[in-house]
Amino acid sequence: MATPSTMVSAPAGASPADDISPALLPVVALLSSTLTYLTNWFNSIPGSPILLRYIRSSYQNDPWRSLLEVLLVAFALRTLLARRTRGEGEGKGLRLSEKEIDELVDDWQPVPLVGPMSDLEKRTLESVPVIYGQNGAHARVAPGGKPVLNLAVYDWLGFVENDEIKNVAIDTLHEYGVGSCGPMGFYGTIDVHTTFEQDVAEFLNVESAIIYAQGFSAVSSAIPAFAKRGDIIVADRGVNFAIHKGLQLARCTVRWYAHGDMKDLERVLASVDREIRRKGGRLTRRFIVTEGIFENDGMMSDLPKICELKKKYKYRLVLDESMSFGMVGAHGRGLTEHYGVPAEEVEILIGSMANALGAGGGFCAGSQHVTAHQRINSGASVFSAAIPAMHATVSSAAVKMMQSQPYLLTNLRANVLTFRQQLVKLEPSPNLIAPSSPNGGAETPFTNNKDALISIPSHPDSGLIHIFLVNPPDTLEEEENVLQEIVDECLANGVIITRARRLRGQESVEPEPSLKVCVSAMFSRKETEKAGKTLRDAIVKVCSKRR
Amino acid sequence: MPRTRSSKASSSASSVTGVPAASAPRNNLASQAGGSATARSTLLGVITRPRHSDAAISYDSSPHHPVDDEVSDQSTISSYASSIGTVNGSPPSDDELERMYKGYLEKPNVLTQSSYKHSEFGHCNNPNYRYTSQYNPAEPVTPEAEPLPPYYVLLTTYMSYTLLILLGHIRDFFGKKLYPSYYEHLMPRDGYAALNSDFDSFYIRRLKVRLDDCFSRPVTGVPGRTIMLLDRYTNDCRESFHLSGTQTRALNVSSYNYLGFASSTGGCADAVEETLKRYGPAGAATRHDAGTLDLHNQAEKLTARFVGSEAAMIVSMGFATNSTNIPALVEKGCLVISDEFNHASIRFGVRLSGASVRTFKHNDVHALEDLLRDCIAQGQPRTHRPWKKIVVIVEGLFSMEGTMVNLPAVIELKRRYKFYLYVDEAHSIGALGPNGRGVCDYFGVDPREIDILMGTFTKSFGAAGGYICGTKDLIDGLKVRSHAFCYAEAMSPPVLTQIIASMAAIMGIAPPLATPVDLDEDVSDSVSIWSRHQSFGPAPRQELPVWFSLPPNMANGTEGRERLRRLAFNSRYLSSGLRKLGFIVYGHRDSPIIPLLLYNPGKMGMFSRMMLNRLGPDKTPIAVVIVAYPATPLITSRVRFCLSASHTKTDIDLLLRACDEVGDILNLKFSSEGPHWPVDKVIASAEELVATTDLDLVQ
Ligand SMILES: Cc1ncc(COP(=O)(O)O)c(C=O)c1O
């Protein structure tokens, strides 16, 4: 960048040739000989006279103009070279005549824009339930129909239906309207956004937070904001799709460890460490990326162990609490509260405002530096309009209620327990539910239930429950069909659950098909029992039919 | 001054033909039929659009001071009172200006019955200040040559950056020695690399921080015609800011509120309130789980109808609409050809998809064709296998440039080269075209010619989120393959209703809820629904929610039409006015995004501050957006105005005065084209400037 000024000042000083002091003469001589040499060299390039004439005529022999143009070109080159996304395939290809190109153009036939849908995809689309009116723990699947129990929404604490929260939203509407009509940088920083950021930071007891307009985009944009080429990320193999996308965008080195396996994590960290030592080189940023409650199976990360390892190997932790925020912990602060780990230990903590908080959007909490960096460098924050004001006020209100009404979380846990008890007979081992064990007993080796139909790796405290078939059919497609049958059977009996939808073919690690159940604090004990029983009966019915 | 000037006082507006004021519209009809082409005929631009370049008449309307008993309905045209103008040609004195603009942002100077606050949606019922946004072959879509500043401007700009960078390095050099604690988080520390190294953050710490008081200004309330800024101060050279507790109301020419639907009152807000009671505030789940509401399906149907294609899908964030759907469309072995100035969300999406990318020079159809020929002929890199498919991605209206894609030319290329066309209409949907349906409407192109029409609801509709429209097969395929449908939250009910309501207001609802308008009463009403192009029809009542209702003038489409035409006038007026004042302005004159070039980095901050703390006689603060590298090329820093239908002509006058004032002080009038006009002349010739197809012809 220093070049422009030096290049500009040189000719300016040298041009009045008559009064040069003798001391400078050798310098001038050198300059002029260099110039002559350069001119000769330039003239020897084929086509140079044309270029010269072009420059002359286009700028009426205005040397300043040409100089500037040269600078511009130099700058353009610089930016071109410095650009992060360079087009591929530039450079020399085959030489073809215009006629040949025309023929090639005529011959070329593109494939259709969207490929045909597979049967599975068709069924996925057909089986999407439509809710009429208020969504929440009780919902109608037909206009004017009877409400059914809805166990397919991430509404752990029932804020979606809360009247107090509705009033907050209406008040906000009459003060702020709906849209924010601008990104945070350009008059989109509404005071209620800042208030929510402070509220959630205080709630988690961290320095600050930043809002994103969508939960999915929060994590997939926050990761590439920090991790650049050359950095190292060690990630759990079972992380959700949004994190996978974030990792893909970050273009750093990604190492995987076996899902939920702390020993494997340590092994990977140690091997990376050895590798770095061997290679030497620059110190790069290193992150461990994992989830609180895993979206793909409801398991919980062993946060204390991860924190211990990250300190030992000097990694930073990116923890996606989209599911666990508002679900676990005495007040719903998530994993950090559950394990009693201070939230400050998690450098980058991501939560969702759409799931538990019953609004929309996501947030990232951390130190002042972490959030300030994202405000300028995170694509989804810089290049997107701020969330509607009412989502922020609703989230603030929800956070306040979590703080003041811990019974909501007690209810949630009680409901989860009740629900799981209904299913326990179908699981491999009857005494799996021990709320104290941190890792849900997912891999308890022994099986004393010969008739087990399902296995549930989800943590006993998790409102998000994934149910896997123990003896699945041979093909993935058939398995999804069986699961869909169970879903349909439940719906016929007044309970909405869902088959975990996947983007087959686009996932980095294909998850096994499963049923997904979301328990809410809003159900009464009886309703929860009914839901559990309905699901159990449906599983038994469908599975016995299959045998 | 215009040759055909005739000055009229507001009360004698119709005295030329001697008919009472109440029948003013018919009067226009008559005068137009009589062949005297006037700018006033813009009122009837729906039927015929003024194509006359030199015969426009403009008016000097006298300064109007509101009379309390003069109350008019927004749709009747009884006065020219919404303008504050010059007194018979002589420029207003400073005292007059100060008086005119006192309390101006909140108090309307015309009394109308309106459900909107003047501070959110300006009251302006002068039918002359309307225009129809439509393609006119007499005006080139893309200018032949980009206007260039004098070279000393480029030179000083480079020098400024050099100086700033040098200074920054010097400060860093000494700073690291003197204040190590400040650099602590930028340096590797006990085995951790810095999250953000001093090198990576140099530009932000040493250059951007100088302008930080102009970015992320905290606001409160509705981002409508005006915006309420929360005043803040800094004690540490803009490292941190503190709220001082006071507030400033400023004219808002920054928000993407093109049609003025961001509002806390009125038909849309009422509908949203009803939804909040019926549906609650949240989407609660992903679309594929139990997150699909009946409202989603209704909004998708309406969007498809609005855009003019077969089917639509809605995503809860505009950015994610691009970034999560492009990967579902293209994969490895496909080629994406992208305009160099495409939005970051598109680049995100393409990067995620794994497809190859090539970029072409902004809006250059010839460059696009050359690239297409080259790519098709060469095939995939190394293997030279033919591409599976080629998708060309362009934006309808470019958000930093104000330029429009040359759609007819691109479609011509599409026929020859068989690529798929993806048009991001984030800014153009709602803001362009006689029916507000975006670039297709503007150019009169059938939207079904474009394979993928993407847009956002953040802008013209005052909501949030985005959509993709296309054939039913495309949308169904996308719905099962889109990341957003499978894993991201569904759009929330209040936002959906805001979309439905604002869209229905632009389209009009059929059958109309109001009694059919009487032809004799008001011509502008009757043309609102029935004269539209087939594919841009009204919203069918039965497809909207049963409980849904809008006030009559929204439901019959009058208000939507008024908004479209106000926006078109405002855009064209400001763009033309700034050019006539001598500024370098990019973009199309019909674009509501108007970038004014500043070049020097030092002028950016000064411009923004001087607009907020005005030096002029009227002192009305104006909130503007400045954009610099990396959002624009380094050299072409700019201020970007985003106009809205909620602005009145007086607001634009004010803005022109302010720009004139600041432009003189900062030396920004670089344009080499034509004589630079005084601002009063620009304001007096507003209608003429808007009506003309060639600014050079107006003398
Ligand atoms: C061209 C384009 N696409 C997409 C977006 C993203 O839209 P949103 O702000 O709704 O996320 C924008 C917004 O600035 C845009 O300009």
Image (cartoon, rainbow, N blue to C red):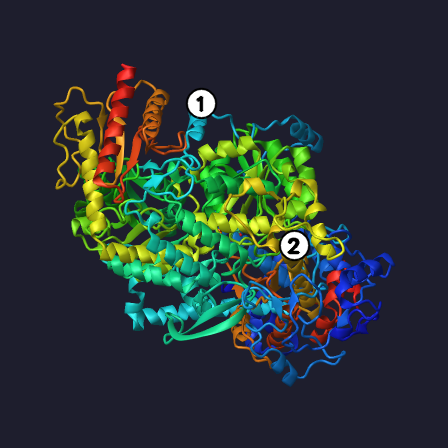
> Which numbered disc covers residue A401?
none
- Amino acid type assigned to the residue bearing label 1 in the image: Asp
The chain under label 1 reads: A
Question: Is any part of residue B350 visible from this angle?
Answer: no
Q: Nearer the viewer, residue A323 or B552?
A: B552
Return the chain for callout 2. Answer: B
- Quadrant of res B62: bottom right
Q: Position of residue B134 (x, y in %)?
A: 71, 51
Q: Which mark is residue B558?
A: 2
Q: Which mark is residue A119?
A: 1
Closer to us: mark 1 or mark 2? Answer: 2
Q: Is residue B40 above or below residue B90?
A: above
Using the image, determine if residue A298 lies above or below residue B554: above
Q: x%, y% of residue A446?
A: 12, 26
Kindly identify the residue that appears in the image at 39 percent across and 44 percent down: A134
Residue A71 place in picture, x, y as percent: 58, 60
What SS does tag 1 mark? helix
Which of B587/B436 is in front?
Answer: B436
- Looking at this view, name the residue that lies furthest to the right: B34
Q: Say few, some or many: other residues with alpha carbon within 10 Å of mark 2 (under 14 / 14 to 19 / 20 or more).
A: many
Q: Quadrant of residue A445?
A: top left
